[in-house]
């Protein structure tokens, strides 16, 4: 297994890593320039020469991973018995410069409901380095003539043909079931055509551990009704505080789908940046500058789920009663 395959396996497993490259060698060193090593939080692949050289690289790489740092950096070591070394003496006589390149886990966003707003939002988010999940119960919303044709798991036509994001499509007649397919830390945006579906997705999102955030499109009156129903389903106020509604940034009053999409995308990008871990002084300063709130990353304990069929039947009955009363 070469270093590229090792890195791809870590990416597939959504595990961050650092590529360590011998960028420059002057004099004698254990490895030549270009040698590579992959460092993950609890694993190694390859070698850059062992000893103090390698131990220093591994320690610094794991510091970068713990801090969630994305910027590469150079580390220069003199291999001499006269040079101070934390991990033992290495007296090859040369000097090496190593390039450490973090490869972080790709953020994940799930858009539930690919209607007018959902499709515009997906177009905006597809221009970002994300894993983008598009979920809809209506097959027509995910038809090739609307979102483009796929070949070999990638779009070859339509609005996502030039996407930077990895776009994953889920046709889910019971859309909340797609929550089980999302990776840890995924940000969930609920904007389906049906308030009953919205309620079921929000309810199940609150019961799903490890989600990054939960956003619900809609008015304050919609959320007031949802709060009552979610309380009846067993959620307390602390759990409901995980739901953000309305979604998007302040100051954009337009109701045009494209304008709403830009507003929501901007807020999601803020949340993604705030969710980056901060383990060293520089990362902490970055978080302070961006207004990161560690409390936003907390996850409330999951509540036991009721029978999904009963939930949807009960919700649809409530919807009909509300319509009759209005």
Image (spheres, rainbow, N blue to C red):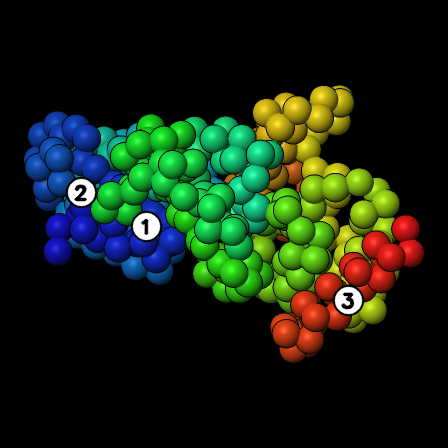
Circle 3 crowding by C-alpha within 10 Å: few under 14, some 14–19, many from 20: few
Q: Do residues under tags 1 and 3 come within 8 Å of each other at their CB atoms? A: no
Q: Secondary structure at mark 3?
A: helix
Q: Secondary structure at mark 1?
A: helix
Q: Earlier in the sequence, mark 3 or mark 2?
A: 2
User: Which residue of the protein is positioned furthest toward the right in this rendering?
Assistant: 325
Residue at point 10% right, 42% down? Answer: 31
Residue 304 appears in view? no
Residue at point 17% right, 42% down? Answer: 36
Residue at point 23% right, 31% down? Answer: 97
Q: Position of residue 110 (x, y in %)?
A: 52, 47
The residue carrying mark 2 is: 36
212, above or below 209, in the image: above
Task: Give the image quarter of residue 57.
Answer: top left
Q: Do residues under tags 3 and 2 come within 8 Å of each other at their CB atoms? A: no
Q: CA distance from mark 3 to mark 2?
A: 61 Å
The residue carrying mark 3 is: 317
Front label number (1 vs 3): 3
Q: Earlier in the sequence, mark 1 or mark 3?
A: 1
* 286 or 16: nearer the viewer: 16
Circle 1 crowding by C-alpha within 10 Å: few under 14, some 14–19, many from 20: some
Q: Position of residue 88 (x, y in %)?
A: 26, 51
For the N terminus, the quadrant is bottom left
The residue carrying mark 1 is: 11
* 314 or 94: nearer the viewer: 314
Residue at point 87% right, 57% down? Answer: 324
Q: Position of residue 160 (x, y in %)?
A: 38, 33
Q: CA distance from mark 1 to mark 3?
A: 44 Å
130, above or below 43, in the image: above
Front label number (3 vs 2): 3
């Amino acid at each position: 297994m070469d270093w590229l395959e090792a890195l791809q396996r870590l990416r597939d497993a959504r595990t961050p890593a650092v590529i360590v490259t011998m960028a420059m060698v002057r004099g004698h060193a254990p490895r030549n320039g270009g040698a590579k090593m992959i460092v993950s939080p609890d694993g190694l692949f390859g070698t850059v020469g062992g000893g103090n050289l390698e131990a220093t690289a591994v320690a610094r790489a794991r510091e970068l991973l713990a801090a969630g740092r994305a910027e590469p950096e150079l580390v220069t070591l003199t291999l001499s018995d006269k040079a101070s070394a934390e991990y033992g003496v290495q007296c090859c006589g040369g000097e090496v410069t190593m390039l450490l390149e973090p490869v972080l886990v790709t953020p994940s966003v799930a858009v539930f409901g690919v209607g007018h707003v959902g499709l515009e939002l997906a177009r905006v988010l597809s221009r970002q380095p994300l894993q983008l999940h598009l979920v809809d119960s209506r097959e027509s919303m995910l038809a090739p003539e609307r979102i483009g044709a796929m070949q070999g798991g990638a779009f070859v036509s339509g609005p996502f043909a030039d996407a930077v994001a990895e776009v994953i499509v889920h046709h889910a007649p019971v859309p909340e079931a797609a929550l089980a397919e999302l990776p840890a830390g995924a940000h969930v945006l609920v904007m389906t055509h049906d308030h009953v579906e919205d309620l079921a997705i929000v309810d199940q999102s609150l019961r799903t551990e490890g989600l990054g955030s939960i956003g619900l499109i809609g008015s304050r009156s919609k959320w007031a009704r949802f709060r009552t129903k979610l309380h009846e389903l067993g959620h307390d106020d602390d759990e409901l505080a995980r739901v953000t509604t309305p979604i998007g940034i302040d100051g954009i009053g337009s109701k045009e789908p494209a304008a709403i999409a830009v507003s929501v995308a901007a807020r999601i990008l803020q949340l993604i940046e705030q969710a980056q871990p901060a383990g060293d002084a520089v990362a902490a300063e970055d978080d302070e500058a961006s207004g990161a709130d560690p409390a936003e990353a907390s996850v409330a304990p999951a509540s036991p789920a009721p029978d999904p069929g009963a939930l949807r039947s009960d919700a649809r009955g409530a919807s009909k009663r509300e319509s009759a009363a209005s």
